[in-house]
């Protein structure tokens, strides 16, 4: 799992970055045809796909951001993803991480008010205008220029970004100003929706908007057991249901119930039921 933007900034060989107070710009590229992992978004991020595409699994379903599209990802969101590179150009994107104080200062100067009726989304995808794509190109040029370190110019570029959005994609500005999406999420809802995913306890904590220690404490209060015991019980119940009532083979089952390999699944299954998963068939 990657926490972004922090983890991306630790890999300069793969992700060029420009940082200034209030926002961060990252160019992310790779030449593999497929890269899969998961992310936790700490700040709202505007993602511009230059080549290839990315598929992101949110709680409400899978969103695909294609080459030439832009997507706004909300903060405090955990999501598995798959990046697909093209044969010629691989995968390339530019990410704009926008600090809330920076956004609010811009909104005050231009007298922009939050729209209370704005519905909050985990993600928002739209087609950019030609002018916006030209702006992206001007930002990319900065990565290879001495002006990359000119804080005043960078401040102007980020203000220019918000001006473009205000005039051409007001729906994105309304999302940025909405101020919704509290850090902590309902623990029962998070666990019931995600217990079949292959994820560590730290990742479940991140999904719920909690530190690992707070996650374990809150979990005990809500479920009256530990996360590990609860996850094992839920996964085993689902595994034996699939083996008894569907045509799924053992390999398909362990992949569907949050295990990364058969040996781990078989051992956990035998410990729980007293016999191996193969004996059911």
Image (cartoon, helix red, strand yellow):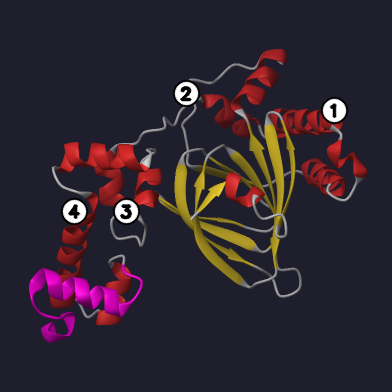
Which span is picked out in magenta? 259-281
Give the Cα distance between marks 1 and 2: 35 Å
Give the Cα distance between marks 2 and 4: 38 Å
Residue 193 place in picture, x, y as percent:
30, 51
For marks 4 and 1, the one nearer the N-term is 1
Residue 134 place in picture, x, y as percent:
84, 45
For marks 2 and 4, the one nearer the N-term is 2
Give the number of the mark in front: 1 or 2.
1
Residue drawn at (31%, 45%), measured in percent from left and top?
Answer: 190
Q: Is residue 131 in sight in this rendering?
A: yes
Give the Cα distance between marks 2 and 3: 29 Å
For marks 3 and 4, the one nearer the N-term is 3
Which quadrant holds residue 25?
top right
Q: Residues within 10 Å of mark 2 (few under 14, many from 20)?
A: few
- Magenta-span inclusion, residue 276: yes
Give the Cα distance between marks 3 and 1: 44 Å
Frontmost residue, 275 versus 165: 275
Residue drawn at (22%, 80%), measured in percent from left and top?
Answer: 247
For marks 3 and 1, the one nearer the N-term is 1
33 lies above or below 95? below
From the image, tell me which residue sits under label 3. Answer: 194
- The single residue placed furthest to the left in the displayed view is 274
Residue drawn at (55%, 19%), measured in percent from left and top?
Answer: 114
Asked if the residue at tag 4 contacts the one at tag 3, i.e. Cβ–Cβ closer than 8 Å, the answer is no
Residue 108 place in picture, x, y as percent:
67, 14
Give the number of the mark in front: 2 or 3.
3
Image side of residue 209 versus residue 277, left or right: right
Give the number of the mark in front: 3 or 1.
1
From the image, tell me which residue sits under label 4. Answer: 230
């Amino acid at each position: 799992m990657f926490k972004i933007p922090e983890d991306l900034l630790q890999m300069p060989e793969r992700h060029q970055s420009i940082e200034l107070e209030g926002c961060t710009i990252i160019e992310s590229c790779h030449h593999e045809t497929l890269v899969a992992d998961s992310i936790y978004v700490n700040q709202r991020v505007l993602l511009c796909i230059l080549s290839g595409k990315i598929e992101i699994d949110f709680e409400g379903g899978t969103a695909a951001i294609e080459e030439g599209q832009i997507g706004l990802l909300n903060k405090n969101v955990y999501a598995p993803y798959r990046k697909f590179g093209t044969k010629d150009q691989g995968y390339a994107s530019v990410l704009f991480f926008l600090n809330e104080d920076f956004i609010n200062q811009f909104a005050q100067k231009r007298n922009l008010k939050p729209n209370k009726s704005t519905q909050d989304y985990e993600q928002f995808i739209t087609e950019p205008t030609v002018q916006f794509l030209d702006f992206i190109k001007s930002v990319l040029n900065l990565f290879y220029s001495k002006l990359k370190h000119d804080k005043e110019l960078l401040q102007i570029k980020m203000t220019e970004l918000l001006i473009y959005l205000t005039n051409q994609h007001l729906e994105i500005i309304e999302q940025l100003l909405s101020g919704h999406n509290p850090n902590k999420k309902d623990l029962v809802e998070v666990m019931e929706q995600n217990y079949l995913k292959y994820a560590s306890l730290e990742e479940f904590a991140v999904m719920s908007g909690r530190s690992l220690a707070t996650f374990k404490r809150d979990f005990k209060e809500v479920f009256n057991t530990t996360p590990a015991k609860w996850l094992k019980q839920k996964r085993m119940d689902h595994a034996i249901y699939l083996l008894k009532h569907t045509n799924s083979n053992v390999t398909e089952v362990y992949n569907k119930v949050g295990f990364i390999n058969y040996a781990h699944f078989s051992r956990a299954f035998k410990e729980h039921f007293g016999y191996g998963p193969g004996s059911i068939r």
